[in-house]
Image (cartoon, grey):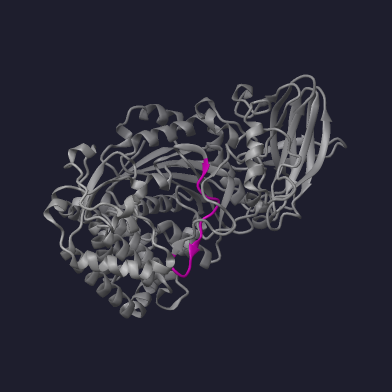
């Protein structure tokens, strides 16, 4: 079955051609009213960027203030259905939005299409105006046509000018009476490279509510399932999705396409690898990997599949991530890996993090019109052709962290690019509401980051990775995050054991790491700060100003002095028995925490707090161990590099994963 919907259209001169829908205009449902700015805008497109795409902040704020009076803003009350809305008398509605503008530069770069057709169905008297932008964010009017009564307007548009960036969109302006926008879509009469079907796979660990919700969303939008061969839930938790309230209902709505696989907790990489494996085995053309704690925009499934079908070659196509708790905020437009320190650039020079579309529309945001090319896409939503899986293998067996980045870079090296496609997205808990660089997750971050470097770093001995890692150890150490440092040290020790044991460690390493937490006070959480001893200030801040970040000039001597204090200065009984301060999570920075001997610190979610206590003896031990293990990694780098690269094909193979799955899973058909 073709994932690109075929429709018939007859032109004014009688030329009848078969058209495929690339992207249709959509609108939010009742449960998603607050996300309207992602779908619909109001107001004029003319001069949206001012005289220059580098509009000053004050001008942008003034424009938002004028729009905030409600005189000409889009209203959810005018949304008629998933695909229809209306413009009130005299109102101008714009579809220059994340979900409804057409990302022309992405289609221009990654597919052979060089023209598209826009079809807009309206009822009432007014105008339909088409606009485009370039990579600099400059707006250009393309064409305007008058409409009256029941009208179908078509515009044939070139993709030639969009080499570096730019979007298409359209506005509808009503006259003396309202104009209904009954449907709109972007079309092509060209055949795709392939017509693929999909296995949609969700990896979950005790997130039954999220899973049931997403399965329900899919069941309520059957158009999203047209190209879906199977919906697969890999359940690795103890709270089983198949036993959750509402499961029977959603299973029935999915029409026999749902299957549950129960397996031991093999982490995200184990769950996603299972999805890859099953998609290969059932002869799907694609596997769509979805995280469990997301809310999916179902139209995204169709858009990813259609785009992948039209790509010049098999291509990984991913969706973006919006903040689940602030739903108009886009995390980032693209993911890249810094090849020198092996870390994500946040953000790269061409974009900004955490853009809020309710404050600045697509038209107001010049930098968003430049195409963003990526190294990988996060596995919160990523479509992978099974042809790629058959050639380069499945995920690394690394439990969590860096599996998606490594796979994207591995695929890219094999000639298969990744595209993060605007207009396809999920809502996910933002990284600002998590702190996965400390605690048990630091083990996986560290080990897997080094594995990535051994496999893919273009620099001898990993470039600046070891230096950066040592600095992180030092920061965590003087911040009294000893459990985190110990986990990082253990990670490098396990790294040096080589790749042979990675599969065997999948079900065992997490409980072993978590068991170590009992020996560290900073990992013992209580829901209320009043459950800890009262704060007693041992020393007053200098001149009452508290602590501040040292200047770059003074940083080195300041840091040396702090390290000496951490290592050599004993902790008084009072500071062991009473915390010196209560520190909010956002203030938990190394330069601040290094000033205390003890403090109560809240967690990222704000749901609990723990007691950080300085331990000079432990600081000394961890500093020595950190330097030793990093030095040993450097010394063994050539050997480790050869071992991991030689083993990559074997440890990611279907056969290796098949053996692991057989040992740790049971299958139940639904």
Residue drawn at point x = 73 percent, y = 26 percent: 91
Is residue 458 shown left or right of residue 315? Answer: left
Q: Is residue 398 in sight in this rendering?
A: no
Q: Is residue 174 in sight in this rendering?
A: yes
Is residue 441 shown left or right of residue 2? Answer: left
Farthest residue to the left: give it. Answer: 573
Residue 607 colored in magenta in the image: no
Q: Measured from the top left, where is residue 137 in percent x and y?
A: 69, 50
Farthest residue to the top: give it. Answer: 177
Q: Measured from the top left, where is residue 71 in percent x and y?
A: 68, 25
Is residue 310 shown left or right of residue 441? Answer: right
Using the image as rendered, state which of residue 1 and residue 404 is in the foreground: 404
Q: Measured from the top left, where is residue 139 in percent x and y?
A: 74, 46
Q: Is residue 66 above or below residue 637?
A: above
The quadrant the N terminus occupies is top right
Q: Is residue 382 above or below residue 16?
A: below
Secondary structure that dominates the magenta span: loop
Residue drawn at point x = 32 percent, y = 40 percent: 606
Q: Which residues are magenta?
A: 329-342
Q: Measured from the top left, where is residue 405 in percent x and y?
A: 45, 59
Residue drawn at point x = 45 percent, y = 29 percent: 253
Using the image as rendered, state which of residue 127 and residue 623 is in the foreground: 623
């Amino acid at each position: 079955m073709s994932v690109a919907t075929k429709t018939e259209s007859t032109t004014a001169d009688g030329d009848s051609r078969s058209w495929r829908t690339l992207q249709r205009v959509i609108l939010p449902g009742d449960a998603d009213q607050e996300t309207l700015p992602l779908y619909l805008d109001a107001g004029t497109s003319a001069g949206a960027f001012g005289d220059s795409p580098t509009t000053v902040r004050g001008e942008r704020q003034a424009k938002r203030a004028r729009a905030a009076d409600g005189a000409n803003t889009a209203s959810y009350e005018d949304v008629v259905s998933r695909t229809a809305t209306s413009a009130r008398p005299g109102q101008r509605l714009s579809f220059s939005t994340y979900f409804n503008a057409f990302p022309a530069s992405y289609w221009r770069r990654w597919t052979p299409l060089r023209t598209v057709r826009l079809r807009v169905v309206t009822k009432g008297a007014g105008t339909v105006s088409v606009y485009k932008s370039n990579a600099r964010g400059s707006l250009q009017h393309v064409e305007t046509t008058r409409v009256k009564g029941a009208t179908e307007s078509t515009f044939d548009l070139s993709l030639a000018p969009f080499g570096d960036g730019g979007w298409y969109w359209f506005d509808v302006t009503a006259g003396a009476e309202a104009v209904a926008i009954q449907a709109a879509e972007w079309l092509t009469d060209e055949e795709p490279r392939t017509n693929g079907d999909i296995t949609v796979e969700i990896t979950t660990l005790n997130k039954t509510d999220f899973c049931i919700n997403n399965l329900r969303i899919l069941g309520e939008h059957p158009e999203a399932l047209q190209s879906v061969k199977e919906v697969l839930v890999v359940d690795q938790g103890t709270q089983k999705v198949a036993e959750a309230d509402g499961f029977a209902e959603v299973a029935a709505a999915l029409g026999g396409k749902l299957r549950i696989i129960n397996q031991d907790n093999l982490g995200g990489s184990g769950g996603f690898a299972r999805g890859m494996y099953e998609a290969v085995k059932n002869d799907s053309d694609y596997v769509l990997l979805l995280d469990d704690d997301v809310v999916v925009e179902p139209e995204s499934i169709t858009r990813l599949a259609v785009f992948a079908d039209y790509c010049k070659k098999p291509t990984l196509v991913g969706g973006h991530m919006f903040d689940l708790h602030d739903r108009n905020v886009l995390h980032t437009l693209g993911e890249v890996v810094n090849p020198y320190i092996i870390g994500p650039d946040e953000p790269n020079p061409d974009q900004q993090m955490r853009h809020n579309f309710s404050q600045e529309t697509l038209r107001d945001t010049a930098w968003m019109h430049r195409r963003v090319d990526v190294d990988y896409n996060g596995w919160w939503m990523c479509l992978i052709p099974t042809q790629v899986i058959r050639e380069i293998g499945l995920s690394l067996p690394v439990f969590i962290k860096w599996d998606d980045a490594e796979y994207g870079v591995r695929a890219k090296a094999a000639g298969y690019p990744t595209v993060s496609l605007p207009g396809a997205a999920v809502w996910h808990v933002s990284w600002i509401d998590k702190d996965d660089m400390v605690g048990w997750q630091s083990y996986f971050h560290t080990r897997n980051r080094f594995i990535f470097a051994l496999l893919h770093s273009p620099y001898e001995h990993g470039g600046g990775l070891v230096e950066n890692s040592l600095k992180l150890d030092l920061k965590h150490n003087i911040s009294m995050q000893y459990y985190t440092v110990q986990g990082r040290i253990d990670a490098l020790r396990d790294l040096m054991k080589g790749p042979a044991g990675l599969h065997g460690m999948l079900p065992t390493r997490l409980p072993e790491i978590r068991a170590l937490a009992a020996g560290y006070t900073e990992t013992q959480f209580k829901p209320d700060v009043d459950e800890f001893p009262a704060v007693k200030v041992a020393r007053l801040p200098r001149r009452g100003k508290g602590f501040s970040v040292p200047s770059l000039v003074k940083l080195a001597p300041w840091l040396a002095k702090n390290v000496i204090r951490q290592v050599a200065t004993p902790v008084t009984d009072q500071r062991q028995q009473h915390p010196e301060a209560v520190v909010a999570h956002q203030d938990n920075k190394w330069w601040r925490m290094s000033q205390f001997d003890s403090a109560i610190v809240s967690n990222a979610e704000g749901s609990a707090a723990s007691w950080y206590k300085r331990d000079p003896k432990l600081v000394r031990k961890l500093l020595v161990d950190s330097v030793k293990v990093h030095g040993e990694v450097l010394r063994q780098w050539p050997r480790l590099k050869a071992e991991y690269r030689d083993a990559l094909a074997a440890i990611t193979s279907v056969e290796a994963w098949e053996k692991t799955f057989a040992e740790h899973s049971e299958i139940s058909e639904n």
